[in-house]
Image: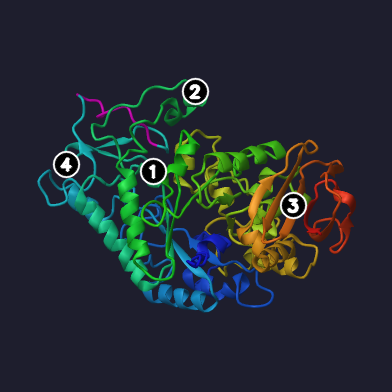
C-alpha cells in the first residue's frame, strides 16, 4: 500500500503578516526593523504564552527609495539599511526557525524601482544590453502607445527624456514594469529566488503576479461602463490586455519548479490585483508539477457583516476551486481598512464581532492569514490629508485617505508611542493605544488576544480543524452560518451568529453537542438533541457526542 505523503506545513500553518516599518523599532528612528521583529519572536511563538502562529510573511525589506514603501525595489539581493542588513536577516531566519516559525518573503517582480541599476542602464539608450528589460515604446504622435491606466491613477505610460520613449508603469511612475517576455529578465528573477532560498527562506508571496505578462501587441483595453470609472479611470476599462495573459501559466510552473527543488516544502502564495473574474485566480493553482501552492482569496475580506455574504464566499471556493487546491482566508492586510473598524458598530472595537470573525478565519478549512495587530483589535486610524504618507493616497482626489490608516505602529503597551519606538514614529500611533495594547490584553483572560491564543492552540491540537472535510449547513436561521469539519469519526460543528438577536438552530439529529470553545457559553456545556442556541454575536465550536 502506498503511504499518503505528510501534509505540507503551509496547509497547517497560521500565517502572520508583519509590516516591518510598523512592528517594532530598536534604533529610535521611528521605523520598525528586523532587530525589532527578532525581539518580538517570543510573542509570536516559542513560549507557553505566545500567540502560537506558524509562519511570518514580511512585507518588503529590500533596498528601496520607499516611493511605495518597499514595493519599489532597487536591489533584490540585499536588505534596506533602515531595516538592518543581511547579517541581521540571517539572524532573524535562524531565531525564527529555532522557534519553528517559517519565514515568507514578499517577492515584488512585476516592476522594480526606477532607481534599480537595471532600469538606469535600460534608459540610457535603445542599444544597451538591458534596453528591453522593461517595456519601452514610441508614442502615437503626442499620445502614449495605448489607453492603459495606472492602478494608482493617470496614464500607465511615462515619457522619458533620456531615451526619448515611453515606458510602462502599471503602478507609480517610479515603478517601471519589467518585460517578462525577455528570457534574461526571467533568469534574473530565478537567480533572486535562489539567493533567498539558499539562505533558508521558506517561501514567497508573489506581489501582483497576474500583471507579469502584458499583451504582446499592447492592444488598448476595451471601455467599461462604471460609475467608479468617472472618478477612477482604471475602473473605466476591461483589463483584457494588461494582465492575466496565457504565458503566465508556464512561468508560474518554472517558479514552482524552483521552490520544489529545495527541501522543506518551500512554497508560493500569489496575490492577484484587480482580478475581474475572481474564478480565474483558481486557474493559477497547480499540482506538484505546476502552478502556485496557494492563491489569496480576498472575497471574505470584501464581505459585509452578513452571514449570507460569508456563505457566498465559501460556496464560491467550494464550487470553483480545482480539486485538492488549498483555500486561503484573510480579513485584513496592508492595503485595506482593518476589519476591526469595518465590522465595528462604533468608534471602538466591537469585541463580540471581532471574536466571531476570528472564529470564522481560524476554523474554515485552509490557510488563515492574520495581519499584525488584529489579534488585539487594532483599528483604522483616520489621518488628515496633509499627514498621509502613502503616495497613491496623495495622488488621488483630496478625500481619499490612502492606506496609512491600517499601517500604524503595533501597540505593545500603554507607555510612550505604545512601546513601538523611543523616537518619533513614522506614522502616528492610534489614539486608543492606552486601552488597546498587548500588555493589557495579555493580562485580561476575556480579551481578544487571549481568545486568539485559545483558538490557535485548539486549531493546532485538533487534526479535524487542520485537515477535516468542511460542509456548509443549509436552512439555518437568517444571519447565522453553520458548518462542520469532520475527519476519522470526529465531527465538529461551528456556529456563528452575525445577528444581535439570539438564534435557535435545529440541526435535525438526536445527539448532543459538547462546547469546546465559545465566546458566550461555558466550555464543557452541551446543546441537547441537536439544537444549537446561539447568543447574539456568538461563536461556538462544538464536538458531536456519539
Which circle's residue, 4 or 1, is located before the other in the chain?
4
* Residue 144 lies within the magenta run: yes
Which circle's residue, 4 or 3, is located before the other in the chain?
4
Nearer the camera: disc 1 or disc 3? 3
Name the one closer to the observer, 279 or 490.
490
Image quadrant in which you'd find residue 342: top right
- How crowded is the residue under tag 2: few (<14 C-alpha within 10 Å), some, or many (20+)? few
Q: Which residues are magenta?
A: 141-150
Nearer the camera: disc 4 or disc 3? 3
- CB-based contact (under 8 Å), mark 4 and mark 3: no
Q: Residue at x 46, y 78 (%)?
A: 94
Residue 8 placement, left or right of 255: right
| Residue topped by disc 1 | 210
- How crowded is the residue under tag 1: few (<14 C-alpha within 10 Å), some, or many (20+)? many
Residue 226 is marked as: 2
> For the stretch drawn in magenta, what is the main secondary structure?
loop
Which circle's residue, 1 or 2, is located before the other in the chain?
1
Residue 163 is marked as: 4
Q: Residue furthest front?
A: 1
Task: Answer whether residue 30 is visible to the viewer in this image.
Answer: no
Q: CA distance from mark 1 to mark 2?
A: 22 Å
Q: Residue at x 50, y 47 (%)?
A: 323
Amino acid at each position: 500500500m502506498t503511504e499518503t505523503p505528510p501534509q505540507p506545513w503551509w496547509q497547517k500553518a497560521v500565517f502572520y503578516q508583519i509590516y516591518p516599518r510598523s512592528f517594532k523599532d530598536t534604533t529610535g528612528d521611528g521605523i520598525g526593523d528586523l532587530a525589532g521583529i527578532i525581539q518580538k519572536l517570543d510573542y509570536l511563538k516559542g513560549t507557553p504564552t505566545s500567540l502560537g502562529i506558524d509562519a511570518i510573511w514580511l512585507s518588503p525589506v529590500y533596498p528601496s527609495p520607499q516611493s511605495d514603501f518597499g514595493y519599489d525595489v532597487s536591489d533584490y539581493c540585499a536588505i534596506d539599511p533602515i531595516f538592518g542588513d543581511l547579517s541581521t536577516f540571517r539572524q532573524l531566519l535562524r531565531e525564527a526557525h529555532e522557534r519553528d516559525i517559517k519565514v515568507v518573503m514578499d517577492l515584488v517582480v512585476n516592476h522594480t524601482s526606477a532607481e534599480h541599476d537595471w532600469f538606469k542602464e535600460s534608459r540610457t539608450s535603445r542599444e544597451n544590453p538591458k534596453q528591453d528589460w522593461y517595456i519601452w515604446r514610441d508614442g502615437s504622435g503626442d499620445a502614449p502607445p495605448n489607453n492603459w491606466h495606472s492602478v494608482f491613477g493617470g496614464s500607465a505610460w511615462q515619457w522619458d527624456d533620456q531615451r526619448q520613449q515611453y515606458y510602462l508603469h502599471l503602478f507609480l511612475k517610479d515603478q517601471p514594469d519589467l518585460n517578462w517576455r525577455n528570457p534574461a529578465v526571467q533568469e534574473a528573477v530565478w537567480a533572486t529566488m535562489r539567493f533567498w532560498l539558499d539562505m533558508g527562506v521558506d517561501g514567497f508571496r508573489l506581489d501582483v503576479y497576474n500583471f507579469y505578462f502584458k499583451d504582446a501587441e499592447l492592444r488598448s483595453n476595451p471601455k467599461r461602463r462604471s460609475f467608479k470609472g468617472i472618478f477612477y479611470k482604471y475602473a473605466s476599462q476591461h483589463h483584457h490586455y494588461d494582465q492575466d495573459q496565457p504565458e503566465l501559466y508556464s512561468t508560474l510552473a518554472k517558479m514552482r519548479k524552483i521552490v520544489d527543488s529545495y527541501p522543506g516544502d518551500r512554497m508560493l502564495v500569489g496575490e492577484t490585483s484587480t482580478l475581474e473574474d475572481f474564478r480565474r485566480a483558481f486557474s493559477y493553482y497547480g499540482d506538484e508539477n505546476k502552478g502556485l501552492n496557494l492563491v489569496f482569496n480576498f472575497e471574505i475580506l470584501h464581505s459585509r457583516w452578513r452571514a449570507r455574504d460569508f456563505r457566498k464566499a465559501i460556496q464560491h471556493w467550494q464550487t470553483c476551486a480545482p480539486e485538492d487546491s488549498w483555500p486561503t482566508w484573510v480579513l485584513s492586510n496592508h492595503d485595506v481598512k482593518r476589519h476591526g473598524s469595518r465590522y465595528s458598530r462604533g468608534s471602538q472595537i466591537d469585541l463580540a464581532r471581532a471574536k466571531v470573525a476570528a472564529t470564522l478565519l481560524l476554523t474554515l478549512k485552509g490557510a488563515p492569514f492574520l495581519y499584525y495587530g488584529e489579534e488585539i483589535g487594532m483599528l483604522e486610524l483616520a489621518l488628515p490629508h496633509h499627514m498621509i504618507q502613502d503616495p497613491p493616497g496623495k495622488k488621488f482626489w483630496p478625500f481619499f485617505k490612502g492606506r496609512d490608516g491600517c499601517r500604524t505602529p503595533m501597540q505593545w503597551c500603554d507607555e510612550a508611542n505604545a512601546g513601538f519606538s523611543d523616537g518619533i514614529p513614522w506614522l502616528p500611533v492610534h489614539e486608543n493605544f492606552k486601552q488597546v495594547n498587548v500588555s493589557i490584553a495579555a493580562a485580561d483572560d476575556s480579551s481578544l488576544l487571549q481568545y486568539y491564543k485559545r483558538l490557535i492552540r485548539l486549531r493546532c491540537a485538533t487534526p479535524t480543524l487542520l485537515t477535516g472535510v468542511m460542509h456548509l449547513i443549509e436552512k439555518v436561521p437568517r444571519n447565522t452560518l453553520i458548518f462542520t469539519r469532520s475527519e476519522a469519526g470526529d465531527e465538529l460543528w461551528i456556529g456563528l451568529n452575525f445577528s444581535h438577536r439570539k438564534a435557535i438552530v435545529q440541526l435535525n439529529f438526536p445527539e448532543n453537542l459538547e462546547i469546546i470553545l465559545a465566546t458566550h457559553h461555558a466550555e464543557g456545556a452541551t446543546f441537547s438533541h441537536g439544537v444549537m442556541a446561539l447568543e447574539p454575536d456568538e461563536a461556538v465550536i462544538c464536538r458531536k457526542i456519539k
